[in-house]
Image (cartoon, rainbow, N blue to C red):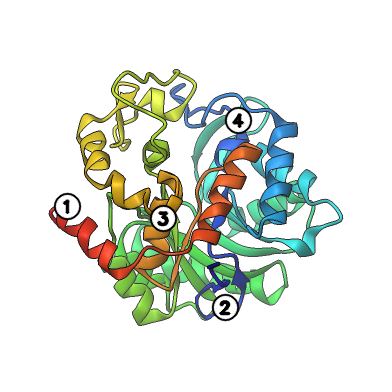
Amino acid sequence: MGVPPRTLGRSGIEVSAIGFGAWAIGGPYYAADGTAVGWGEVNDDESVAALRRAVELGITFIDTADSYGAGHSERIIGRAFAGRRDEVVIATKFGNVFDESRRVLTGIDVSPEYIRRACRASLDRLGTDHIDLYQLHIGEMPLERVDETIATLEDLVAEGLIRAYGWSTDDPERAAAFAKGPHCATVQNQMNVFDDAPEMLAVCDAHDLASINRGPLAMGLLTGKYDATSRLPGDDVRGASPAWMTYFTGGRPNPEFLARLDAVREILASGGRTLAQGALGWLLARSGRTVPIPGIRTVAQAEQNAGALRHGPLTAGQLTEIDSLLRR
Protein backbone atom coordinates (compact mmCIF):
# COMPACT_ATOMS: atom_id res chain seq x y z
CA MET A 1 0.00 0.00 0.00
CA GLY A 2 2.60 2.55 1.07
CA VAL A 3 2.02 5.96 2.62
CA PRO A 4 3.00 9.04 0.60
CA PRO A 5 5.13 11.80 2.15
CA ARG A 6 3.46 14.42 4.33
CA THR A 7 4.07 18.16 4.45
CA LEU A 8 5.12 20.05 7.58
CA GLY A 9 2.20 22.46 7.69
CA ARG A 10 2.57 25.56 5.56
CA SER A 11 6.36 25.22 5.29
CA GLY A 12 6.19 23.11 2.15
CA ILE A 13 8.85 20.81 3.68
CA GLU A 14 8.09 17.21 2.70
CA VAL A 15 8.83 14.44 5.18
CA SER A 16 8.23 10.71 5.43
CA ALA A 17 4.86 10.01 7.07
CA ILE A 18 6.70 8.36 9.98
CA GLY A 19 9.81 9.87 11.56
CA PHE A 20 12.74 8.61 13.61
CA GLY A 21 12.48 9.65 17.26
CA ALA A 22 16.08 10.14 18.44
CA TRP A 23 15.60 10.65 22.20
CA ALA A 24 16.78 7.13 23.10
CA ILE A 25 20.00 7.23 21.04
CA GLY A 26 21.24 10.08 23.25
CA GLY A 27 21.98 7.52 25.95
CA PRO A 28 21.87 8.22 29.70
CA TYR A 29 21.51 11.74 31.05
CA TYR A 30 19.97 13.16 34.19
CA ALA A 31 17.87 15.93 35.69
CA ALA A 32 19.58 18.23 38.20
CA ASP A 33 18.27 16.06 41.06
CA GLY A 34 19.88 12.94 39.60
CA THR A 35 16.69 11.43 38.13
CA ALA A 36 17.25 9.58 34.84
CA VAL A 37 15.67 11.32 31.83
CA GLY A 38 17.25 9.17 29.13
CA TRP A 39 16.55 5.60 28.04
CA GLY A 40 19.62 3.85 29.39
CA GLU A 41 22.86 2.74 27.75
CA VAL A 42 23.15 2.72 23.97
CA ASN A 43 25.58 1.41 21.38
CA ASP A 44 26.56 4.34 19.17
CA ASP A 45 27.53 2.12 16.21
CA GLU A 46 24.09 0.48 16.36
CA SER A 47 22.45 3.93 16.55
CA VAL A 48 24.28 5.05 13.41
CA ALA A 49 23.31 1.81 11.66
CA ALA A 50 19.67 2.27 12.72
CA LEU A 51 19.59 5.85 11.39
CA ARG A 52 21.03 4.81 8.04
CA ARG A 53 18.77 1.74 7.75
CA ALA A 54 15.70 3.88 8.50
CA VAL A 55 16.60 6.20 5.61
CA GLU A 56 17.12 3.22 3.27
CA LEU A 57 13.56 2.11 4.14
CA GLY A 58 12.00 5.54 3.56
CA ILE A 59 12.07 7.14 7.03
CA THR A 60 13.78 10.43 6.20
CA PHE A 61 12.49 12.69 9.02
CA ILE A 62 14.79 12.69 12.07
CA ASP A 63 13.53 14.33 15.29
CA THR A 64 15.92 15.07 18.15
CA ALA A 65 16.64 17.76 20.77
CA ASP A 66 19.83 19.42 21.90
CA SER A 67 19.23 18.09 25.41
CA TYR A 68 18.83 14.40 24.45
CA GLY A 69 21.87 12.79 26.00
CA ALA A 70 23.08 16.35 26.71
CA GLY A 71 24.07 16.84 23.07
CA HIS A 72 24.94 13.22 22.31
CA SER A 73 21.90 12.45 20.13
CA GLU A 74 22.70 15.40 17.85
CA ARG A 75 26.34 14.30 17.58
CA ILE A 76 25.33 10.76 16.55
CA ILE A 77 22.96 12.13 13.88
CA GLY A 78 25.77 14.34 12.61
CA ARG A 79 28.02 11.29 12.41
CA ALA A 80 25.39 9.16 10.63
CA PHE A 81 24.73 11.70 7.89
CA ALA A 82 28.13 13.31 7.39
CA GLY A 83 28.33 13.87 3.63
CA ARG A 84 24.68 12.73 3.28
CA ARG A 85 22.87 15.73 4.78
CA ASP A 86 20.53 16.14 1.79
CA GLU A 87 19.00 12.68 2.42
CA VAL A 88 17.22 13.74 5.62
CA VAL A 89 14.99 16.41 7.14
CA ILE A 90 16.32 17.21 10.62
CA ALA A 91 14.24 18.61 13.47
CA THR A 92 15.77 19.54 16.81
CA LYS A 93 14.69 21.49 19.90
CA PHE A 94 15.93 24.20 22.25
CA GLY A 95 15.20 25.65 25.69
CA ASN A 96 16.76 23.16 28.09
CA VAL A 97 20.21 24.13 29.38
CA PHE A 98 22.64 21.29 30.05
CA ASP A 99 26.21 20.43 30.97
CA GLU A 100 27.46 18.18 28.18
CA SER A 101 30.48 16.91 30.12
CA ARG A 102 28.40 15.80 33.12
CA ARG A 103 25.30 14.85 31.05
CA VAL A 104 23.06 16.83 33.37
CA LEU A 105 20.19 19.24 32.67
CA THR A 106 20.89 22.47 34.56
CA GLY A 107 17.95 24.76 33.78
CA ILE A 108 15.73 26.45 31.21
CA ASP A 109 16.50 29.48 29.04
CA VAL A 110 14.33 30.91 26.26
CA SER A 111 15.94 34.34 26.02
CA PRO A 112 16.72 35.54 22.47
CA GLU A 113 20.44 35.45 23.23
CA TYR A 114 20.28 31.87 24.45
CA ILE A 115 18.16 30.69 21.50
CA ARG A 116 20.82 32.04 19.12
CA ARG A 117 23.62 30.33 21.05
CA ALA A 118 21.69 27.06 21.26
CA CYS A 119 20.97 27.12 17.52
CA ARG A 120 24.64 27.56 16.61
CA ALA A 121 25.66 24.83 19.08
CA SER A 122 23.11 22.42 17.52
CA LEU A 123 24.35 23.24 14.01
CA ASP A 124 27.87 22.43 15.17
CA ARG A 125 26.94 19.10 16.80
CA LEU A 126 24.79 18.09 13.81
CA GLY A 127 27.56 19.05 11.37
CA THR A 128 25.20 21.07 9.20
CA ASP A 129 24.65 24.65 8.08
CA HIS A 130 20.88 24.60 8.61
CA ILE A 131 18.17 23.01 10.75
CA ASP A 132 14.97 22.14 8.86
CA LEU A 133 12.64 22.43 11.86
CA TYR A 134 13.61 24.16 15.12
CA GLN A 135 11.25 23.49 18.02
CA LEU A 136 10.70 25.15 21.36
CA HIS A 137 11.11 22.36 23.94
CA ILE A 138 9.53 24.15 26.92
CA GLY A 139 5.87 23.11 26.81
CA GLU A 140 4.68 25.54 29.49
CA MET A 141 6.60 28.66 28.43
CA PRO A 142 4.45 31.70 29.41
CA LEU A 143 2.32 33.10 26.60
CA GLU A 144 3.73 36.59 27.19
CA ARG A 145 7.09 35.36 25.81
CA VAL A 146 5.63 34.13 22.53
CA ASP A 147 6.12 37.33 20.48
CA GLU A 148 9.77 37.68 21.50
CA THR A 149 10.45 34.01 20.73
CA ILE A 150 8.74 34.19 17.32
CA ALA A 151 10.77 37.30 16.45
CA THR A 152 14.03 35.52 17.31
CA LEU A 153 13.07 32.45 15.27
CA GLU A 154 12.02 34.60 12.29
CA ASP A 155 15.48 36.20 12.41
CA LEU A 156 17.07 32.74 12.30
CA VAL A 157 14.91 31.90 9.25
CA ALA A 158 15.99 35.15 7.55
CA GLU A 159 19.63 34.25 8.23
CA GLY A 160 19.17 30.80 6.65
CA LEU A 161 20.04 28.94 9.85
CA ILE A 162 16.59 27.32 10.17
CA ARG A 163 13.82 26.71 7.61
CA ALA A 164 10.76 26.54 9.88
CA TYR A 165 9.87 26.25 13.56
CA GLY A 166 7.29 24.82 15.95
CA TRP A 167 6.44 24.27 19.61
CA SER A 168 6.55 21.02 21.54
CA THR A 169 3.52 21.54 23.78
CA ASP A 170 0.29 19.78 24.69
CA ASP A 171 -1.60 23.06 25.16
CA PRO A 172 -3.78 23.98 22.13
CA GLU A 173 -3.88 27.64 23.21
CA ARG A 174 -0.08 27.85 23.13
CA ALA A 175 0.08 26.08 19.77
CA ALA A 176 -2.43 28.55 18.33
CA ALA A 177 -0.49 31.53 19.74
CA PHE A 178 2.74 30.33 18.11
CA ALA A 179 0.95 29.75 14.79
CA LYS A 180 0.85 33.51 14.11
CA GLY A 181 4.55 33.29 13.28
CA PRO A 182 4.90 33.30 9.47
CA HIS A 183 7.30 30.32 9.45
CA CYS A 184 5.61 28.33 12.23
CA ALA A 185 4.86 24.93 10.71
CA THR A 186 4.25 22.40 13.47
CA VAL A 187 3.23 21.49 16.95
CA GLN A 188 4.78 18.43 18.60
CA ASN A 189 2.22 16.85 20.89
CA GLN A 190 1.64 13.68 22.87
CA MET A 191 -0.67 11.43 20.87
CA ASN A 192 -1.29 7.71 20.49
CA VAL A 193 -4.07 5.10 20.51
CA PHE A 194 -4.52 5.64 24.27
CA ASP A 195 -4.27 9.46 24.17
CA ASP A 196 -6.15 11.07 21.31
CA ALA A 197 -5.73 14.84 20.85
CA PRO A 198 -8.80 16.18 18.99
CA GLU A 199 -8.39 19.76 20.27
CA MET A 200 -4.80 19.93 19.05
CA LEU A 201 -5.73 18.49 15.65
CA ALA A 202 -8.42 21.19 15.39
CA VAL A 203 -5.74 23.86 15.98
CA CYS A 204 -3.57 22.22 13.30
CA ASP A 205 -6.47 22.30 10.84
CA ALA A 206 -7.28 25.92 11.64
CA HIS A 207 -3.69 27.16 11.28
CA ASP A 208 -2.27 24.72 8.71
CA LEU A 209 0.21 23.05 11.06
CA ALA A 210 1.52 19.50 11.10
CA SER A 211 1.04 17.46 14.29
CA ILE A 212 4.29 15.67 15.13
CA ASN A 213 3.28 12.88 17.47
CA ARG A 214 5.60 12.11 20.36
CA GLY A 215 4.92 9.04 22.46
CA PRO A 216 3.22 7.32 19.48
CA LEU A 217 3.92 3.89 21.01
CA ALA A 218 3.15 5.01 24.59
CA MET A 219 6.82 4.78 25.62
CA GLY A 220 7.00 1.26 24.23
CA LEU A 221 3.83 -0.10 25.83
CA LEU A 222 2.07 -0.33 22.44
CA THR A 223 4.79 -2.65 21.10
CA GLY A 224 3.48 -5.47 23.31
CA LYS A 225 7.01 -5.99 24.64
CA TYR A 226 6.04 -5.34 28.28
CA ASP A 227 3.63 -7.16 30.59
CA ALA A 228 2.72 -7.10 34.29
CA THR A 229 6.01 -8.81 35.22
CA SER A 230 8.26 -6.30 33.40
CA ARG A 231 10.62 -4.12 35.42
CA LEU A 232 12.56 -1.24 33.86
CA PRO A 233 16.07 -0.27 35.13
CA GLY A 234 16.70 2.92 37.10
CA ASP A 235 18.79 4.55 34.34
CA ASP A 236 15.76 4.39 32.03
CA VAL A 237 13.22 7.24 32.33
CA ARG A 238 10.44 4.60 32.47
CA GLY A 239 12.18 2.86 35.35
CA ALA A 240 12.57 6.18 37.15
CA SER A 241 8.82 6.76 36.54
CA PRO A 242 8.59 10.55 37.09
CA ALA A 243 5.12 11.93 37.90
CA TRP A 244 4.32 12.74 34.23
CA MET A 245 5.03 9.15 33.18
CA THR A 246 1.50 7.70 33.11
CA TYR A 247 2.29 4.52 31.15
CA PHE A 248 4.75 3.18 33.75
CA THR A 249 4.48 3.48 37.52
CA GLY A 250 7.17 2.38 39.96
CA GLY A 251 9.22 1.11 37.02
CA ARG A 252 6.45 -1.25 35.88
CA PRO A 253 3.78 -1.00 33.16
CA ASN A 254 0.63 0.68 34.42
CA PRO A 255 -2.00 -2.13 34.70
CA GLU A 256 -4.73 0.23 33.47
CA PHE A 257 -2.91 0.73 30.16
CA LEU A 258 -2.10 -2.98 29.83
CA ALA A 259 -5.85 -3.62 30.06
CA ARG A 260 -6.55 -1.03 27.36
CA LEU A 261 -3.94 -2.65 25.12
CA ASP A 262 -5.63 -6.03 25.54
CA ALA A 263 -8.93 -4.46 24.49
CA VAL A 264 -7.59 -3.24 21.13
CA ARG A 265 -4.81 -5.78 20.51
CA GLU A 266 -6.70 -7.72 17.84
CA ILE A 267 -7.49 -4.65 15.74
CA LEU A 268 -3.97 -3.25 15.93
CA ALA A 269 -2.49 -6.60 14.86
CA SER A 270 -4.89 -6.98 11.92
CA GLY A 271 -3.66 -7.52 8.37
CA GLY A 272 -0.37 -9.08 9.44
CA ARG A 273 0.79 -5.99 11.34
CA THR A 274 2.81 -6.03 14.53
CA LEU A 275 1.20 -4.15 17.42
CA ALA A 276 3.59 -1.24 16.87
CA GLN A 277 2.72 -1.08 13.19
CA GLY A 278 -0.98 -1.05 14.09
CA ALA A 279 -0.46 1.75 16.62
CA LEU A 280 1.36 3.81 13.98
CA GLY A 281 -1.36 2.94 11.46
CA TRP A 282 -3.93 4.39 13.88
CA LEU A 283 -2.06 7.72 13.94
CA LEU A 284 -1.67 7.79 10.15
CA ALA A 285 -5.43 7.21 9.79
CA ARG A 286 -6.38 9.75 12.44
CA SER A 287 -5.43 12.80 10.33
CA GLY A 288 -3.50 13.69 7.20
CA ARG A 289 -1.53 16.12 9.37
CA THR A 290 0.02 13.57 11.74
CA VAL A 291 3.67 12.54 11.63
CA PRO A 292 4.40 9.97 14.37
CA ILE A 293 8.02 9.80 15.58
CA PRO A 294 8.52 6.43 17.31
CA GLY A 295 11.74 6.07 19.26
CA ILE A 296 14.27 3.92 17.40
CA ARG A 297 17.65 2.71 18.59
CA THR A 298 18.24 -0.57 16.74
CA VAL A 299 18.20 -1.67 13.13
CA ALA A 300 15.39 -4.11 13.98
CA GLN A 301 13.23 -1.28 15.36
CA ALA A 302 13.92 0.81 12.26
CA GLU A 303 12.78 -2.07 10.09
CA GLN A 304 9.64 -2.71 12.14
CA ASN A 305 8.58 0.94 12.19
CA ALA A 306 9.26 1.35 8.47
CA GLY A 307 6.93 -1.62 7.97
CA ALA A 308 4.07 0.62 9.13
CA LEU A 309 4.61 2.68 5.97
CA ARG A 310 4.12 -0.49 3.92
CA HIS A 311 0.97 -1.56 5.77
CA GLY A 312 -0.52 1.93 5.69
CA PRO A 313 -3.27 3.48 7.83
CA LEU A 314 -6.01 1.58 9.65
CA THR A 315 -9.50 1.95 8.18
CA ALA A 316 -12.11 4.46 9.36
CA GLY A 317 -14.16 1.53 10.63
CA GLN A 318 -11.26 0.27 12.73
CA LEU A 319 -10.80 3.75 14.25
CA THR A 320 -14.48 3.81 15.22
CA GLU A 321 -14.22 0.33 16.73
CA ILE A 322 -11.16 1.33 18.80
CA ASP A 323 -13.00 4.41 20.09
CA SER A 324 -15.87 2.18 21.14
CA LEU A 325 -13.62 -0.38 22.85
CA LEU A 326 -11.78 2.38 24.76
CA ARG A 327 -15.15 4.01 25.62
CA ARG A 328 -14.30 7.34 23.97
Of helix, strand and loop, which one carries label 1? helix
Q: Nearer the viewer, mark 2 or mark 3?
A: 3
Q: Amino acid at mark 1?
A: Leu
Q: Earlier in the sequence, mark 4 or mark 2?
A: 2
Q: Nearer the viewer, mark 1 or mark 2?
A: 1
Q: Which residue is mark 3?
A: 271
Q: Nearer the viewer, residue 281 or 99?
A: 281
Q: Amino acid at mark 4?
A: Gly
Decide: marks 4, 2 in contact (CB < 8 A)? Answer: no
Q: Which residue is mark 1?
A: 325
Which residue sits at x=32%, y=18%? 229
Q: Nearer the viewer, residue 2 or 260?
A: 2
> Which label was assigned to residue 27?
4
Residue 300, horizontal then vertical, whole percent: 61, 38
> Dot 3: within a 10 Å radius of its alpha carbon, few (fewer than 14), some, or many (20 or more) residues?
few
Distance between the alpha carbons at the discs numbered 3 and 4: 35 Å
Q: Earlier in the sequence, mark 2 or mark 3?
A: 2
Q: Which residue is mark 2?
A: 11
Of helix, strand and loop, which one carries label 3? helix
